[in-house]
Protein backbone atom coordinates (compact mmCIF):
# COMPACT_ATOMS: atom_id res chain seq x y z
CA UNK A 1 0.00 0.00 0.00
CA UNK A 2 1.28 3.46 -0.87
CA UNK A 3 0.12 5.11 2.31
CA UNK A 4 -2.78 6.54 4.19
CA UNK A 5 -4.56 9.72 3.33
CA UNK A 6 -5.96 11.37 6.43
CA UNK A 7 -7.72 13.88 4.17
CA UNK A 8 -9.54 11.07 2.34
CA UNK A 9 -10.40 9.40 5.63
CA UNK A 10 -11.92 12.61 6.97
CA UNK A 11 -13.79 13.31 3.73
CA UNK A 12 -15.37 9.84 3.66
CA UNK A 13 -16.24 10.11 7.35
CA UNK A 14 -18.08 13.37 6.67
CA UNK A 15 -19.87 11.89 3.63
CA UNK A 16 -20.95 8.86 5.69
CA UNK A 17 -22.20 11.20 8.42
CA UNK A 18 -24.75 12.64 5.97
CA UNK A 19 -26.24 9.17 5.40
CA UNK A 20 -29.20 9.28 7.77
CA UNK A 21 -30.95 6.18 6.36
CA UNK A 22 -28.23 3.55 6.77
CA UNK A 23 -26.57 3.95 10.18
CA UNK A 24 -23.94 6.36 8.88
CA UNK A 25 -22.35 3.65 6.73
CA UNK A 26 -20.77 4.16 3.32
CA UNK A 27 -19.96 1.89 0.40
CA UNK A 28 -16.90 2.71 -1.72
CA UNK A 29 -17.37 1.42 -5.28
CA UNK A 30 -14.26 0.53 -7.27
CA UNK A 31 -14.96 -0.09 -10.97
CA UNK A 32 -12.02 -2.49 -11.28
CA UNK A 33 -12.01 -6.16 -10.48
CA UNK A 34 -10.61 -7.10 -7.09
CA UNK A 35 -7.75 -8.91 -8.87
CA UNK A 36 -6.86 -5.75 -10.82
CA UNK A 37 -6.94 -3.67 -7.64
CA UNK A 38 -4.57 -6.04 -5.85
CA UNK A 39 -2.31 -6.13 -8.92
CA UNK A 40 -2.12 -2.33 -8.82
CA UNK A 41 -0.72 -2.57 -5.28
CA UNK A 42 2.38 -4.14 -6.80
CA UNK A 43 2.96 -0.97 -8.85
CA UNK A 44 2.51 1.44 -5.92
CA UNK A 45 -1.21 1.85 -6.59
CA UNK A 46 -3.97 0.17 -4.74
CA UNK A 47 -7.27 0.90 -3.10
CA UNK A 48 -8.72 2.05 0.19
CA UNK A 49 -7.93 -0.02 3.27
CA UNK A 50 -11.29 -0.16 5.03
CA UNK A 51 -9.51 -0.67 8.37
CA UNK A 52 -8.82 3.08 8.28
CA UNK A 53 -12.32 4.11 7.19
CA UNK A 54 -14.91 3.70 9.91
CA UNK A 55 -18.27 2.28 8.80
CA UNK A 56 -17.07 1.82 5.20
CA UNK A 57 -17.08 -1.17 2.90
CA UNK A 58 -15.53 -1.52 -0.55
CA UNK A 59 -17.28 -3.20 -3.47
CA UNK A 60 -15.46 -4.12 -6.66
CA UNK A 61 -17.60 -3.86 -9.81
CA UNK A 62 -15.48 -6.13 -12.04
CA UNK A 63 -15.69 -3.88 -15.10
CA UNK A 64 -13.16 -5.46 -17.45
CA UNK A 65 -12.21 -2.43 -19.51
CA UNK A 66 -13.09 0.81 -17.79
CA UNK A 67 -11.45 2.78 -20.61
CA UNK A 68 -13.87 1.21 -23.09
CA UNK A 69 -16.76 2.21 -20.85
CA UNK A 70 -15.44 5.78 -20.68
CA UNK A 71 -15.11 5.92 -24.47
CA UNK A 72 -18.66 4.60 -24.96
CA UNK A 73 -20.09 7.17 -22.53
CA UNK A 74 -18.18 9.89 -24.36
CA UNK A 75 -19.65 8.76 -27.69
CA UNK A 76 -23.17 8.70 -26.25
CA UNK A 77 -22.65 12.22 -24.93
CA UNK A 78 -21.34 13.40 -28.31
CA UNK A 79 -24.38 11.90 -30.02
CA UNK A 80 -26.70 13.66 -27.58
CA UNK A 81 -25.09 17.00 -28.44
CA UNK A 82 -25.36 16.58 -32.22
CA UNK A 83 -28.31 18.00 -34.14
CA UNK A 84 -31.29 15.63 -34.26
CA UNK A 85 -31.07 15.06 -38.00
CA UNK A 86 -27.52 13.66 -37.67
CA UNK A 87 -28.15 11.32 -34.72
CA UNK A 88 -29.71 8.55 -36.83
CA UNK A 89 -26.51 8.02 -38.81
CA UNK A 90 -24.11 7.80 -35.85
CA UNK A 91 -23.12 4.57 -34.14
CA UNK A 92 -21.07 3.69 -31.11
CA UNK A 93 -18.52 1.64 -33.04
Image (cartoon, rainbow, N blue to C red):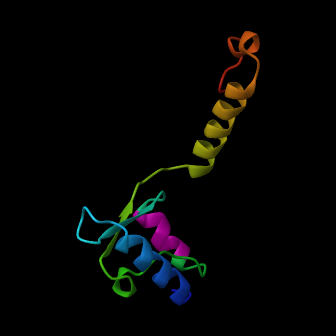
Tell whether 58 sits left or right of 75: left
The residue depicted at 28 percent of the width and 65 percent of the height is 20
**In the rendered structure, does residue 37 fall within the stretch colored magenta?**
yes
Q: How many marks?
A: 0
**In the rendered structure, does residue 21 fall within the stretch colored magenta?**
no
92 versus 4 height, above or below: above
The spot of residue 84 in percent (x, y) is: 71, 14
Tell whether 29 sits left or right of 65: left
Q: Is residue 66 among the parts visible in the rendering?
A: yes
Q: Give the range drawn in magenta.
A: 34-40
The residue depicted at 63 percent of the width and 49 percent of the height is 67
Q: Is residue 5 among the parts visible in the rendering?
A: no
Q: In which quarter of the image is residue 91?
A: top right
Tell whether 1 sits left or right of 89: left
The residue depicted at 68 percent of the width and 11 percent of the height is 88
The prevailing secondary structure element of the residues shown in magenta is helix
Tell whether 39 sits left or right of 13: right
Q: In which quarter of the image is residue 73?
A: top right
Of the 4 image quadrants, the one containing the C terminus is top right
77 versus 48 height, above or below: above
Near-viewer residue (20 or 36): 20
The spot of residue 15 in percent (x, y) is: 43, 71
The residue depicted at 74 percent of the width and 9 percent of the height is 85
Near-viewer residue (11 or 92): 11
30 versus 76 height, above or below: below
Amino acid sequence: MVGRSTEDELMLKEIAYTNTKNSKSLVIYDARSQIAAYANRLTKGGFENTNYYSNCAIEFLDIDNIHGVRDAISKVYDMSQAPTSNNSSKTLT
